[in-house]
Image (cartoon, grey):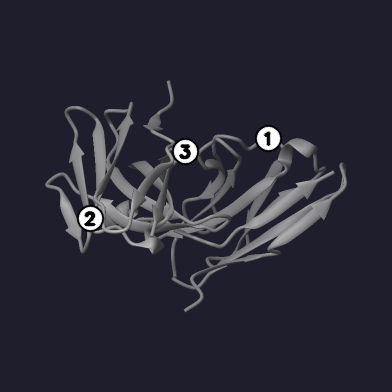
Amino acid sequence: RKEVEQDPGPFNVPEGATVAFNCTYSNSASQSFFWYRQDCRKEPKLLMSVYSSGNEDGRFTAQLNRASQYISLLIRDSKLSDSATYLCVVAMNTGFQKLVFGTGTRLLVSP
Amino acid sequence: NAGVTQTPKFQVLKTGQSMTLQCAQDMNHNSMYWYRQDPGMGLRLIYYSASEGTTDKGEVPNGYNVSRLNKREFSLRLESAAPSQTSVYFCASNPGEGATRRAAQHFGDGTRLSIL
């Protein structure tokens, strides 16, 4: 079983749609959680950290359920520029920050 | 504001050749990391440097060596390149101390390496 699992997609949605991605992780001792965005052949860029109480940044909302070891990302009012691969990332922070990456969920937003 | 800078951006090598990938950050971060990304797999940690003067193996260190030259620079060396090392390599950094150890990592824009 992979440590971080994501549906690879692609998710094809029209502009303006709401789309949700899910991610599960296997290590219950994981301490920090992130969503990164990666455009084709580019570096991962931090989209948002995920906090236990859930957090929102504009059109993006992230939720964390530690009991179920589940992380979600909701994108409202999708834009063409949201087309990318979204990486679910979990971290252990003991001595150094060990990141474990999911393989990503691809989103395609069409006009 | 450059952030994390990697050189070169692209490289083609022949099997058995050696080369060094360079990485520098200007954010005064303590911790630096080298990853590789292959199709269908998540990024995997090759080596990391939790602080200046220290380096440690990650998940896939075989065939690589690293040097933390100073606080800013962290290089990755392939001593004898193999086709299995064809990949995209990313360098990253984060503050790495105390509470900021939890801060997200910032990535360079990658080196695309092909080994024939």
Task: Name the residue rendered at 17%, 53% in the picture.
Answer: A55
- Residue A96 can be seen in this image: no
The image quarter in which residue B64 lies: top right
| Mark 2, residue position | A76
Q: Secondary structure at mark 3?
A: loop
Question: Mark 3: which amino acid?
Answer: Thr
| Mark 3, residue position | A103
Residue at mark 3 to residue at mark 1: CA–CA distance: 22 Å
Task: Name the residue rendered at 41%, 45% in the picture.
Answer: A87
- Residue B2 can be seen in this image: yes
Expressed as whole percent of the image width and height from the top left, the position of residue B70 reads 58, 65
Q: Residue furthest bottom?
A: B1
Pick the front one: A96 or B13: B13
Label 1 marks a residue whose chain is: B
The image quarter in which residue B15 lies: top right
Q: Which mark is residue B62?
A: 1
Expressed as whole percent of the image width and height from the top left, the position of residue B7 reads 68, 65
Q: Secondary structure at mark 2?
A: loop
Labels 3 and 2 in the same subunit: yes
Q: Mark 3 vs mark 2: which is more N-terminal?
A: 2
Q: Residues within 10 Å of mark 1 (few under 14, many from 20)?
A: few
Q: Which mark is residue A29?
A: none
Question: Mark 1: which amino acid?
Answer: Asn
Q: Is residue B87 above or below residue B24?
A: above
